[in-house]
Amino acid sequence: MKLKSPSRLTTTDYPRIVALWGAAGLHVRPNGRDSQEAFEGQMASGLQTAIGIETESGDLVGIVLATHDGRKGWLNRLAVHPDWRRRGVAKMLIAAAEDALHQQGIDVIAALIEPGNAPSLELFLASGYEEYAGLHYVSKRSRADS
């Protein structure tokens, strides 16, 4: 089965996105920042672009969220259905997200990778990203499900 080119998704794709995140093993916070209401607000802000890859029959097999704060872009929630891994889907998503961010004037793009996720780290390193040893990610959350 062939794949379509990466394309932008909309809020109507939310159920398919959440289903793919689940199939790919991503932790979903359905009552917090991954809720439909939060997703719709993020999309309405203009600071988030959802990019997906579908099969010719319309099955969503890959997703990435490209976000930015006006000066730095982030690739978030990159997920590929397990049946479609190791076929270049993630690399196509990264390239499409980078293009979308560059079109918005963003020149610095980053991604956070959880410890122990060697395949994601290898993917980003192979895509030209650099690892910065000694950086620490810290966050402060107003709610546990945020």
Image (cartoon, rainbow, N blue to C red):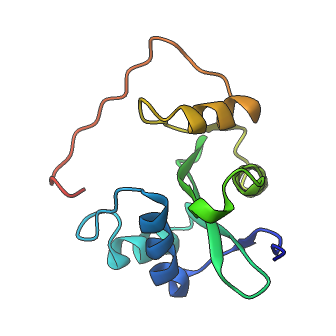
Q: State the image coordinates of residue 103 (x, y, percent, origin top left).
A: 78, 56
Residue 96, quarter of picture: bottom right
Residue 120, quarter of picture: top right
Left-right relation of 119 to 103:
left
Front residue of this view, candidates 74 and 92: 92
Tell me if I can see residue 26 in this picture. Answer: yes
Q: State the image coordinates of residue 69 (x, y, percent, origin top left).
A: 52, 48
Residue ranking furthest to the left: 143
> Residue at the location (29% across, 63% down)?
29
Residue 4's place in the image compared with 78, above or below, is below
Q: State the image coordinates of residue 125 (x, y, percent, origin top left).
A: 69, 28
Left-right relation of 22 to 128:
left
Q: Quadrant of the N terminus?
A: bottom right
Front residue of this view, candidates 80 and 47: 80
Front residue of this view, candidates 85 and 8: 85
> Residue at the location (51% across, 80% down)?
16
Left-right relation of 96 to 33:
right
Residue ranking furthest to the top: 134
Residue 95's place in the image compared with 82, above or below, is above
> Residue at the location (20% across, 46% down)?
141
Residue 131's place in the image compared with 37, above or below, is above
Q: How many marks?
A: 0
Front residue of this view, candidates 65 and 40: 65
> Residue at the location (63% across, 64% down)?
83
Tell me if I can see residue 63 in this picture. Answer: no
Q: State the image coordinates of residue 101 (x, y, percent, origin top left).
A: 70, 52
Q: Quadrant of the C terminus?
A: bottom left
Residue 127's place in the image compared with 62, above or below, is above
